[in-house]
Image: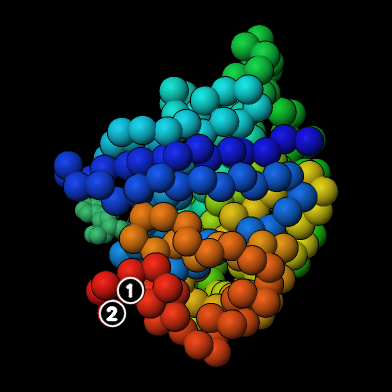
Amino acid sequence: MSEIEIRNLHVSVDGKEILKGVNLTVKQGDVHALMGPNGTGKSTLAYTLMGHPFYEVTEGEVWFKSHNILELEPDERSHLGLFLAFQYPVAIPGVTVANFLRTAINAKRRYFAPDDKGISIPEFRRVLKEKMDLLKMDHNFAGRYLNEGFSGGEKKRAEVLQMAALQPEIAVMDETDSGLDIDALRVVSEGVNTLRGPSLGVLVITHYQRILNYIKPDFVHIMLDGRIVETGGADLALHLEEHGYDWVREKNEPALV
Ligand code: ADP
Ligand code: MG
């Protein structure tokens, strides 16, 4: 059973400390929600986990399968079984969804076995069809250029399909706080619920409570000013929905309120 363990993570952007000692463990099989007001460092955490060069780690470690992944390249982190669903996925004109997925699957296979010939076309077709059926997707989707002209919901669907095809052990989903309509939210949620199971751990990052009406988390964490200041069960999200974040601020920054 693998897990990702974030220990005392400090991250700076442009010399300004954004994450100020984050501790969090996500185990395979569990769904965690990370919530918090805008600008508290949630996306910074997601990008740091995947190794975005912009974010400077000044202290701390992130352990996953006996590696401090902060020392690994983003593609190595991915091959090990970590997945980040982007808040704003980029379009890749000329590359179909199917091609993209096959390339990603083959890159992972070659990472573990350099002589691997890659997944055969019939086998890939079978896997792709199986995953698209699982996610109730139209098969035409596979032939479209990745994210080009996709609606918000389709982009999310493409992210979830990648997740289904790559079968990560830990997925970090940085949910957008704006611009996602209720249908797109439902797409992500249904996808996560379909893929949910003992071999997948998920960290759903969200500003809004409403996605948690669809994905029932096992644990909820609240981030404030670069730290996780509250942890609880699904009821913590319901409490937030009713009372907002003010009580969290009052409790943690009494001098500022
Ligand atoms: P959240 O996802 O919780 O809304 P972010 O991690 O996006 O918060 O941002 C936390 C802080 O880090 C903000 O003050 C933001 O301005 C700063 N920050 C994050 N990424 C960048 C960036 N690429 N350039 C400049 N500032 C950034
Ligand atoms: Mg964010």
Q: Is residue 202 left or right of residue 44?
A: right
Query: What amino acid is at disc 2?
Result: Val
Query: What amino acid is at disc 1?
Result: Pro
Distance from Cα at disc 2 to Cα at disc 1: 6 Å
Kindly state the secondary structure of the residue where label 2 is placed: loop
Q: Residue at x 66, y 10 (%)?
A: 115
When the figure is inspected, residue 180 is found, relative to residue 148, above or below; the finding is below
Kindly state the secondary structure of the residue where label 1 is placed: helix
Q: In this view, does 28 lie to the left or right of 17?
A: right
Q: Residue at x 52, y 40 (%)?
A: 6
When the figure is inspected, residue 221 is found, relative to residue 126, above or below; the finding is below
- Looking at the figure, which quarter contains the C terminus? bottom left
- The x and y percentages for residue 202 are 65, 53
Residue pointed to by mark 2 = 257
- The x and y percentages for residue 130 are 80, 51
Q: In this view, does 149 lie to the left or right of 81?
A: left
Mark 2 closeness class: few <14, some 14–19, many ≥20 residues within 10 Å: few
Q: Residue at x 63, y 59 (%)?
A: 32
Q: Nearer the viewer, residue 23 or 64?
A: 23
- The x and y percentages for residue 187 are 63, 71
Image label count = 2
Q: Residue at x 38, y 77 (%)?
A: 250
2 and 1 marks in contact (CB < 8 Å): yes
